[in-house]
Amino acid sequence: MSKILNEVIETVDGLHSAGVMNEVTMREFHAMALPKIKDYSAEDIKRIRLKNGVSQPVFAAYLNASASTVRQWEQAKKHPQGTALKLINIIEKKGLEALM
């Protein structure tokens, strides 16, 4: 998160604590601060998996998906969504160790 965004969030928290900002508005600011989820191509998914040195079944186990699903992602027949997509983002940035 950028320094400016951190300052904005800190200010929002202070305004909420002072009773000047309501809970809903504060939550909306916090939601805007969440990192964007990157979308991945079939090649990207395979690259991430291979960089982490695991097979499709092992990668699938980390994502709580089936090996068939990972295979379909890597063949561009399906596309990861939701939690799986978020986990792939984490794996790309921090490696499989982040999920242990």
Image (cartoon, rainbow, N blue to C red):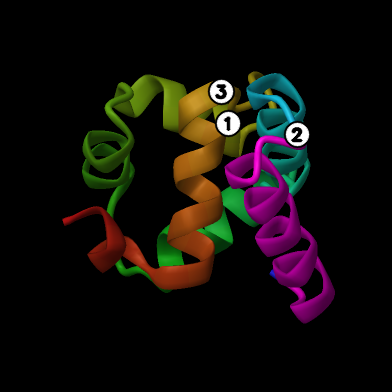
For image coordinates 47% across by 28% down, the residue present is: 83
In which image quadrant can residue 72 be found? top right
For image coordinates 75% across by 34% down, the residue present is: 21
Residue type at tag 3: Gly
Residue 8, given in percent of the width and then of the height, sits at 80, 61
Q: Is residue 16 above or below residue 54?
A: above
In which image quadrant can residue 97 be found? bottom left
Which tag, 3 or 1, sits closer to the chain's start? 1
What separation in Å lies between label 2 and label 1 (alpha carbons)?
A: 44 Å
Residue type at tag 1: Trp
Which tag, 2 or 3, sits closer to the chain's start? 2
Residue 66, given in percent of the width and then of the height, sits at 30, 22
For image coordinates 66% across by 62% down, the residue present is: 10
* Element assignment for label 1: helix
* Element assignment for label 2: loop
Q: Is residue 5 above or below residue 62?
A: below
* Element assignment for label 3: helix
Q: Nearer the viewer, mark 2 or mark 1?
A: 2
What separation in Å lies between label 3 and label 1 (alpha carbons)?
A: 14 Å
Residue 81, given in percent of the width and then of the height, sits at 60, 23
Q: Which residues fall within the magenta stretch?
A: 2-20
- Residue 43 among magenta residues: no
